[in-house]
Image (cartoon, helix red, strand yellow):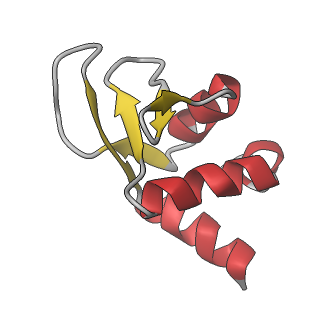
Amino acid sequence: MTPEVAYTRRAQAMLRAVVAGRAQVSCSCEPDLFIDGVSCGDQFTAHALAHAGLITASRLAAIGQRVPAALTPAGLAALADRAA
């Protein structure tokens, strides 16, 4: 986990949207994040969260297909660390 990405307020808001069930990711090597059905305006941070292992697709799907996003155990820990 990189502090520059994981500990920004924007990244934390993205993680909270995933927990709330409001987020989807596209299945690809550079997964795009969608919140409330709209493309997230900061895909750089979305990609960084995915590459840091904080968010992932909730299930396997075809390349490019959108599926619900899920937090990994590391993502849950990052969110809990900031809440404490």
User: Looking at the picture, how far across and down is residue 54, in whole percent?
Assistant: 52, 50
Task: Give 77 or 34, whichever is nearer the viewer.
Answer: 34
Please state if 67 lies on the left or on the right of 51 as rendered.
Answer: left
Identify the residue shown where x is 52% and y is 55%.
17
Task: Give 51 or 10, whichever is nearer the viewer.
Answer: 10
Quarter of the image where one finds residue 12: bottom right
User: Looking at the picture, how far across and down is residue 57, in whole percent?
Assistant: 31, 39
Up-down: is 80 above or below 71?
Answer: below
- State the residue lying farthest toward the top: 63
User: Looking at the picture, how far across and down is residue 59, in whole percent?
Assistant: 19, 41
User: Looking at the picture, how far across and down is residue 82, in whole percent?
Assistant: 73, 73
Q: The C terminus lies in which quarter of the figure?
A: bottom right
Task: Give 74 or 23, whichever is nearer the viewer.
Answer: 23
Up-down: is 42 above or below 84?
Answer: above
Q: Say how many tags the image has.
A: 0
Identify the residue shown where x is 69% and y is 48%.
11
Please state if 65 lies on the left or on the right of 37 as rendered.
Answer: left
Identify the residue shown where x is 51% and y is 61%.
74
Task: Give 77 or 41, whichever is nearer the viewer.
Answer: 41
Please state if 70 lies on the left or on the right of 76 as rendered.
Answer: left
Identify the residue shown where x is 45% and y is 63%.
19
